Amino acid sequence: MADRACSNSSSSLRQLIWDFFQSMDTNHDGRVSFLEFTQFLQQNGYNRVNPNIINNLDTDGDRCLDFYEVLTFYYIVKTRSVWCDSCRANLHSLYFTCVECFDS
């Protein structure tokens, strides 16, 4: 699956992304549940990531992340680690705090 999703990437990058997905999918059912996602965040030092970002990543609404949804998360954490310093919400723009925390 990683080959098809990242066809323009090097084989080492495709393997890295596939390994990233498999490290989340601990029961190897091809999907990452909320529990698997939160455990992954805690175990791998992604303490600044709000686990509720899974709701934004879950584009098909099945309450789990498939490979492509995890690929989006991989892209976010590897290219733009922009989270509110106060509440840890993912910032979808170029701000360093969300509106709610900025006001307080």
Image: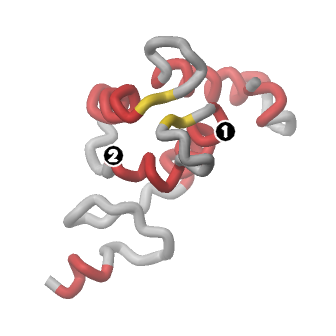
Point out the image quarter for the C terminus: bottom left
Q: Which residue is disc 1 drawn over? A: 68
Residue type highlighted by circle 1: Tyr
- What residue lies at 49% left-to-right and 47% top-to-bottom? 77
Closer to us: 17 or 32: 32
Q: Position of residue 45 (x, y in %)?
A: 30, 35
- What residue lies at 50% left-to-right and 75% top-to-bottom? 93
Question: Which disc number belongs to residue 89?
Answer: none
Q: CA distance from mark 2 to mark 1?
A: 18 Å
* Viewer can see residue 49: no
Q: Position of residue 21 (x, y in %)?
A: 56, 26
Q: Which residue is disc 2 drawn over? A: 51
Q: Taking 16 as reference, is 35 left or right?
A: left
Element on which disc 1 rests: helix
Q: Earlier in the sequence, mark 2 or mark 1?
A: 2
Q: Position of residue 87 (x, y in %)?
A: 22, 63
Element on which disc 2 rests: helix
In the depicted structure, whether residue 58 falls above or below residue 5:
below
* Viewer can see residue 56: yes
Residue type highlighted by circle 2: Pro
Crowdedness of circle 1 by 10 Å Cα count: few (<14), some, many (20+)?
A: some
In the depicted structure, whether residue 33 falls above or below residue 85:
above
Q: Quadrant of residue 37?
A: top left
Q: In the image as oriented, which residue stretches furthest toward the front?
A: 62
